[in-house]
Each structure stands twice: as structure tokens, then as C-alpha cells.
Amino acid sequence: MRVLGIETSCDETGVAIYDTGKGLLGHALFSQVDLHAEYGGVVPELASRDHVRKLLPLVREVMRRTDTHPRDLDGIAYTAGPGLVGALMVGACAGRALAYGWGLPAVAVHHMEGHLLAPMLEERPPSFPFVALLVSGGHTQLVDVRGLGDYRLMGESLDDAAGEAFDKAAKMLDLDYPGGPRLAALAEKGDPERFTFPRPMTDRPGLDFSFSGLKTYTLTTVRQYAQADGLPDEQTCADIAAAFQEAVVDTLVIKCRRAIRVSGHKTLVVAGGVSANKLLRTRLESRLREERAGVYYPRHEFCTDNGAMIAYAGCLRLQAGERSGLAVEVRPRWPMMELDGSLS
Amino acid sequence: MKILALDTTSGACSVALHCDGHTSEQFVRAERDHTRRILPMIDQVLGEAGVSLSQLDALAVGRGPGSFTGLRIAISCTQGLAFAADKPVLPVSSLAALAAGVRREQPHWDAAPIVAALDARMQQVYWGVYTADAPNASLWPEAVQDPQQMAQRLAQSSLPTPVYGAGAGWHYPELAQVPVAEVLVEAEIHARDIAELALPLWQSGAAVAAEDLEPLYLRDEVAWQKRQKIRSK
């Protein structure tokens, strides 16, 4: 089975083709990062406008590069949520219409399920069951994954997502958008021991997270050391970045360890934009070794949004017999636990 | 000549098939339900006529102005269909379609100029002026303006009387004093008029490839706030 996947839920236009026999055949991505940078964040209307321009050229490019003719395809998968409503509509409508035009089945894919399954595109894929840490600008969730669609929420952020906290802290330090990776880079120049930031909700049982207090603590520290222009000196900025990153990573690692113990699973899958964070990867690997659990990630380029994970997730769902009709429905807010687990 | 036309620029959702001189249409007031309605409507219109996508000469679509999110639904569907069937696309002005529809429904308006206006929100209108002779092109560039500016522009113009008005943009009280013979505020955009207007566009070679199809938003300068950096490096 060969499936074309389309992703337009936020500020990346992604297209890919996955083949059950040959694996990922090819993928193409257009990132709008530069477009949104001057606004300091994603402007939803500009994102939607750009998807209209970029989607079909990417489809043509991936079809050409993978030498795929429409008759070679067995289905089309498109992201239907969660995400920005206008952006989702572009990919969902174009994707569903393409499938109709080519006489192919189509399937609406849950964006976070795409992230969750992305590590399965790697050479050494994890196998069910596992605990998944979904950690991005929109999500911080621990999920007990028993099979395709069989997801139980173990814990989640009660306020900001971890990636959102990274971006907001970066803004406080006057870093450019997207702030998360820039803050991580700045943290490498900092002394992680000069400041100790709180590890929210780690001193009580449970698997929920909270990052808004940490954000406030960061702001207070920035103000305390601020010079005339409102910012601390460069080294202090780097030290604050390091302390912030330490606190977020430490919190995530503590909860992941706890989730592995509670679930009894021996595998942790980490996905979403923050899964690219180097410190998080290093710490998880060393601390989970103590639990005799293995950690799996997607390759770097598939940590952020992409079409490959949508093609793959869509392929599994099409194989399981799922079909989406001609009535296109996008869901900007769509809890992953509502997915149908009876397919697995 | 076979053209499939789509429009979702306003609260209505419509699909029409022009098939060798005869036009059939599906039209619903969909409000926020366009994504669910449009492809089943297309399937029905094509099915009833026994026409497949591959038999079409072209697709036509209401290219705006109108609701940003709304008009992209028909644009994206058109892109998918046209790309899949390898057909060209004829982008048609939603304001021109609004005027053409009213002219079709109001024969006594004859060939008089019709001022089509859509509510652009934020106390503004999208508007243009269309004649029977050149139904696709506004007499002056389609614009997004305050109702006062529109009233002033019309007051300064030397349009032959009578002049008629159409569309929800006319609801603004600032337009009450504009000397028009009659106004149909509740007039709506129909895909059948998109299809009709696409015919002369097809003749004049105005078709574009699916990849080059772009909405016409008119409003490009929305006050998206730019980031202020403290330290520039």
C-alpha cells in the first residue's frame, strides 16, 4: 500500500509518500518560520495563505522525486486536527479533493497520532505497548499506548505546554522566533548551577505538569538582573536560559520515569518539537537506563511537523479499514483519546 | 463546453455544472458547514449529469474577495480536483458573480451598472461596479474601503443612470444616501453565475494551472503586529 500524506496544521506545509513494502519513499517540507519570525510567532491568516501557495508544488515535487504516478497510490491521508482551523482546512480540503479526483480512499489523521507514530519510521522502531511523551508547543502529555488508536492519557500539562514555555521564556530573553531551539542554544553557554529554578509538581504524586509558574519565576529573575534596556547582561541571560532548560528537562524526566514505573512498559517514545532538545535526550537516556527502559525518538527532522508522519499514520489507518467520507471535517481541538482503538 | 464551478466566498455554498449550454446547480446556506457540504454537492451535481471530472474542460471558482477562511475552502477543493484531473482553472470575481446573479434574477434592471458590495467586516466593504457589456471586470478596480469612501467615489462618478446595488455590503447606513434606483441587500453569490462568467474568461485565455490558483483577498494589510526587538544583533 502506498499513501500520500499531507500536513498543514500550523506553519509547515509537509507532503510525503509512504509505502508499506519500501518504507518512506520521499518527503518535502516548506517551513514558514521566516515568514512568521518578524511577528514573533505564527500569524494564523498568513499561515493559511502560504499553505495555498505551497501545497500543490510540494505534492508535484514528491510525486516526481519518488517516481509515483497517481495510479500507484492507494490512498491519501491529511491532517484534520488539532491545529489552526484555517490552516487545517487548506490541507484537508485539497487532500480530500485530490483523493476524490483520483478515485482513492482518504483518511483524516490526528496530528498528534502522527507525532506519536513518527519513531516507527526509523530503522530500529519501537513496538507496542509503550509510554509516549508528546511534547511540543501545543502539547505536553504522557500517554499509555497499547496499540494503534488505543491511547490512555496518563498525565498532561494543566497550563502551558513545555514548548510554549520554552518560546515564552525565549521571548523574555529577547530571542528571535522560534524561541525554543534558540533558548536551548543559549543555555549551552550558560552555567546551569548559578540559578535553581523550581521543578513544578514533582514533589507530589501524579503525572500532570504545570509550566506557568516556572515562566513567572523566569520573568522575575530576568527583571531582577535587568539593566537599563530591560535585559540582564549576556552571561546572565545564558545562565537563566540554562536554569530554565534544566528545570523543564528535569521535570519531564521525573514524570517519564514515574510513568514507566506506573505502566510497567519498558519503552518510552518521545515525540513532538521539544523531543529534538539535546539535554532532554541525554537525560532521558541515562535516567531511563536505570529503569531498564529503552527510549525512542523520531529523527531530528521529524520531531517538528512533517508530512511523513501523516502518510505513515494514515497508511496504518487505511490498512485497518478506516475511511473518511466526502464531508470534510477539521477539528482545531481534538483530544487524541477520542480516537477509535478498535482498529488495532 | 463543460465547466464545474464552486463558490464558498460567503455564507452560501454552491456548486454548478455548465454542460454544453445547460447549467445545473446545488445551492445551500451553509454558514460554517462548507467543508462538510461542498464535496458531496460536487459528487451529486456530476453524478446527476453523468459527467466525470475527466470530461470537464475546466474548473471555475469564486476567487474572492470574501471571507478569507471561507473562500479558501472552494479554492483548496478546486486545487485538489484540478490537479488530480489535470484541468485548468478559471478564477472568477465573487463580486462580479454577485452582480451577474442579480442581473439574471432582475430582468428589468436590463444592462444598467450594478454596484456589488460585500460586507468586509471591520466597518468596511469589498465592492466593484459591473456592466452587462463587461460582466467580469469592474469599471474601476475592486476595492476594500470604508462605506463613506465608497459613497464618495460613487458620488464623484459619472455612471449612466439608473444604477442598481446588490449585496450585504449595502447594509451600512453610510450608503443610504447613495442615489441608486434599487438595492438587493440579500442577494447571494451563485456558482451558476461563476460558471457563466467563466465562459468568456475561457475564450480570452484566462485559465491558470491549479498550482497558480490564488485567492484575491483585497485586504492584505491587516494590522498584524510586528515584533519589537530590544537588542539588535
Image (cartoon, rainbow, N blue to C red):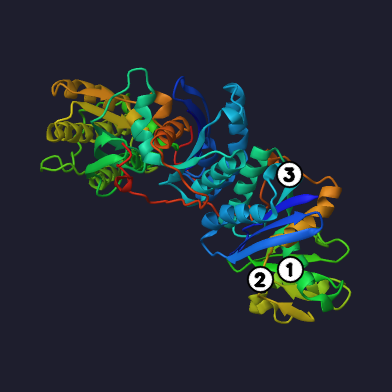
Q: Position of residue A43 (x, y in %)?
A: 50, 47
Q: Which mark is residue B55?
A: 3
Is residue B232 found left or right of B102 in the rendered image?
left
Query: Judging from the image, what secondary structure is the residue with disc 3 in?
Result: helix
Q: Are marks 2 and 1 in contact (CB under 8 Å)?
A: yes
Circle 1: residue type = Ala
State whether discs 3 and 1 lie on one chain: yes
Q: Nearer the viewer, residue A338 or A184?
A: A338
Q: Nearer the viewer, residue B120 or B88?
A: B88
Q: Chain of mark 1?
A: B
Mark 2 or mark 1: whose residue is earlier in sequence = 1
Q: CA distance from mark 2 to mark 1?
A: 8 Å
Q: Residues within 10 Å of mark 2 (few under 14, many from 20)?
A: many
Residue A10 seen from this side = no
Q: Which mark is residue B169?
A: 2
Q: Are marks 3 and 2 in contact (CB under 8 Å)?
A: no
Q: Which mark is residue B116?
A: 1
Between disc 3 and disc 2, the foreground one is 3
Q: Chain of mark 2?
A: B
Q: Chain of mark 3?
A: B
Q: Position of residue A273 (x, y in %)?
A: 37, 34
Residue A113 seen from this side = yes
Is residue A32 found left or right of A165 in the rendered image?
right
